[in-house]
Image: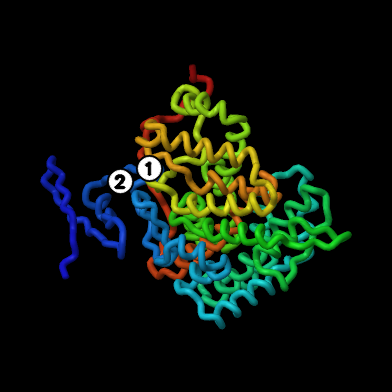
Amino acid sequence: MTQKTIELIDRATDRKVNLPVHPGTIGPSVIDIAALNKEFGLFTYDPGFGGTASTDSRITYIDGDAGVLLYRGYPVEQLAERSTFTEVAYLLLHGELPSRKQLDEFTGSIRHHTMINESLLRFFHGFHYDAHPMAMVSAVVASMSAFYHDTMDIYSARQREIFAHRIIAKIPTIAAAAHKHALGQPYVYPRNDLDYCSNLLHMLYAVPCEPYEVDPVAAQALDLLFVLHADHEQNASTSTVRLAGSTGTNPYAAIAAGISALWGPAHGGANEAVLNMLEQIGTVDNIPKFLAQAKDKTSHVRLMGFGHRVYKNFDPRAKIIREMCHKVLARLGRSDNPLFELALRLEEIALQDEYFVERKLYPNVDFYSGIIYSAIGIPRSMFTVMFAIARTVGWVAHWAEMISDPAMRIGRPRQLYTGPTRRDYVEITKRA
């Protein structure tokens, strides 16, 4: 079968170049532009990489126009309804759903890697009490390379597997320790008899002086959020992990880079911004005024939690979270939560407004996730940390996929230079 190509012609010189077109299994094909610079001396220009495929991957597929999200080919709606976070983690890492035996072995391995070195735990004492949890989590994850340097041969499949299990198991322990440090409470050690999310909730909320019983609905809600946040193709933080990892750096450093990228309010901090926006609106009566400001480009007011860089239709994750939001609030006796009622009304009004409908600004995953986190007692400073726990699975899957690719090269984007042309140094006494 003849490979499809696109012919480009430089009309000034009549030079031609044929650029290969590579098809995916689904979704858009891509043009291989590797020969463009060699033949024409040109680079492509794509600020924000909105139209550039940086790699080929078998992990996650998004169709933004149709509102489709697939993990290894499985619709996220099916996984959210029928699977668990640990099973989805196995799927993302290995490419297939596990057998019962494989899942039991994987879950057992994760449960028995949850403790962190006591010296590592003491690192938290070096942070001020009001340090942001993301700063602590990022720093401690990076420092793990000083403790587990004996299993960091990135070209060993077995050592990559050990790393994957270790970071997925320990990131909740690190996150909970950051939370406890901020509260000034004793650290709570993990319990291997609890499932992944129940264990996290126990470490976050238990205290040594009294028993703590995990609410199963809270654990179920957290597990659902983690499934929905586990991966999202080549987003900013995942691309950061890949770029850092392409240098051959140790995997803990690459994941720490991803955590730092996730910290940005335009990425992992968006659900916190939604709650801040709802509090700013205050009451349903203020919604029309707020939406009018959001339409005014000079007001700097944004409708947070609506619209997405990729999705030009409903974010499939938002529909699922909306239903869970109802369930959690009803279970916890907070069905009259004013922020939730305000969110529902804001969604209703915005989706009937031609301005937002024409621009396809639909609710995204962040619109309701912050309300769920808040309802189960997680403080806003920890919202992005929760996101990082879930997304660590996706980061590891992408890192491992890249490292095991024989064609891997160090990431090195180019630029359009618009600075001064060559000029000579002028002695300081001769400068104006």
x, y percent for residue 345: 53, 37
Which labelled disc corresponds to residue 43?
2
Q: Identify whether 229 is placed above or below 109.
A: above
x 48%, y 73%: residue: 94
Pick the front one: 344 or 358: 344
x, y percent for residue 252: 60, 61
Farthest bottom residue in view: 101
Q: Identify whether 352 is placed above or below 39.
A: above
Q: Quadrant of residue 203?
A: bottom right
The N terminus - image quarter: bottom left
Which labelled disc corresponds to residue 415?
1
Farthest top residue in view: 432
x 57%, y 54%: residue: 324
x 67%, y 46%: residue: 334
Q: Tell me if label 1 and label 2 are in contact, CB under 8 Å.
A: yes
Pick the front one: 213 or 407: 213
x 44%, y 49%: residue: 315
* Mark 1 nearby-residue class (10 Å; few <14, some 14–19, many ≥20): few
x, y percent for residue 312: 37, 45
Viewer can see residue 422: no
Label 2 element class: loop
Q: Is residue 280 left or right of residue 46?
A: right
* Mark 2 nearby-residue class (10 Å; few <14, some 14–19, many ≥20): some
Q: CA distance from mark 1 to mark 2?
A: 8 Å
Chain-order first, disc 1 or disc 2: 2
Which labelled disc corresponds to residue 426?
none
Q: Identify whether 222 is placed above or below 294.
A: below
Q: Amino acid at mark 1?
A: Gln
Label 1 element class: loop
Q: Identify whether 432 is placed above or below 275.
A: above
x, y percent for residue 100: 55, 80
